[in-house]
Image (cartoon, helix red, strand yellow):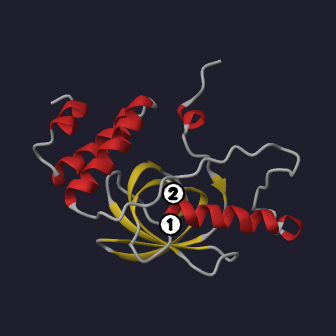
Amino acid sequence: MTPTPKELRRFARLPSRCRAFVRDRFGVWDAFTEDVSPRGCRIVTPRRQTIGALVRLTVVAEQLVEPLLVSGQVVWIREGSPARAGISFTGSPSDGPGAGAWVRSLEAAVAGRASDASPSVHLVPDSAPLDIVVAPPEPQDASPDALARRLADRGEELIRDGQRAAAEVLLRRALAFAPDDARILALLGE
């Protein structure tokens, strides 16, 4: 049996329902996460999203004191009522916790409260082996060149995972920051 792109993810998703405040160029609204990882999350939202839209998220977990503040880009959408969207994280403010550290803290907090967890939180049994992948530290360099490199790296990963359409969205965004970058142009086939 051939693994699907979801099974080939480098970072495991932590099923977790957290409140999320989503900001885009049109305003701020409430949503909630269905899962989170150091690289992104899936949100459920009453608002229709557009692939490629840039957003800022404030994710609040009742188990943690600090919220996750992160920028991201919508990489997939699923229409419906409510709608769902996949957000690929593109960075965090330098003074806040990075997504990797925040997700690890949430995972530890959820595991510590396994006995009184709500039914919406899916926990791995204590006897099951955990395959935890630690994300690299969040980058401190927020320059356009650094953002273009990070977006291109993620785009290349998506291409390897067979998600060409999602990769193209990120690579086009990277091209906006670095219009003459040969690597980005090559990944786009231009």
- Give me the residue at 43% from left, 68% from top: 70
- Give me the residue at 23% from left, 33% from top: 188
Observer-nearest residue: 43 or 72?
72
Please tell me how many numbered marks the rendered image carries.
Answer: 2
Q: Position of residue 119 (x, y in %)?
A: 81, 63
The circle drawn on residue 83 is 2
| Residue underneath mark 1 | 46
Q: Is residue 183 above or below residue 119?
A: above
Q: CA distance from mark 2 to mark 1?
A: 6 Å
Q: Is residue 93 above or below residue 131?
A: below
The secondary element bearing badge 2 is classed as strand
Observer-nearest residue: 160 or 94?
94
Q: Position of residue 123 (x, y in %)?
A: 79, 55
* Amino acid at pointer 2: Ala
Observer-nearest residue: 47 or 61?
61
Q: Position of residue 26 (x, y in %)?
A: 31, 73
- Give me the residue at 79% from left, 43% from top: 129
Question: Mark 1 and mark 2 in contact (Cβ < 8 Å)?
Answer: yes
- Give me the residue at 39% from left, 72% from top: 93
The secondary element bearing badge 1 is classed as loop
Q: Position of residue 33 (x, y in %)?
A: 58, 63
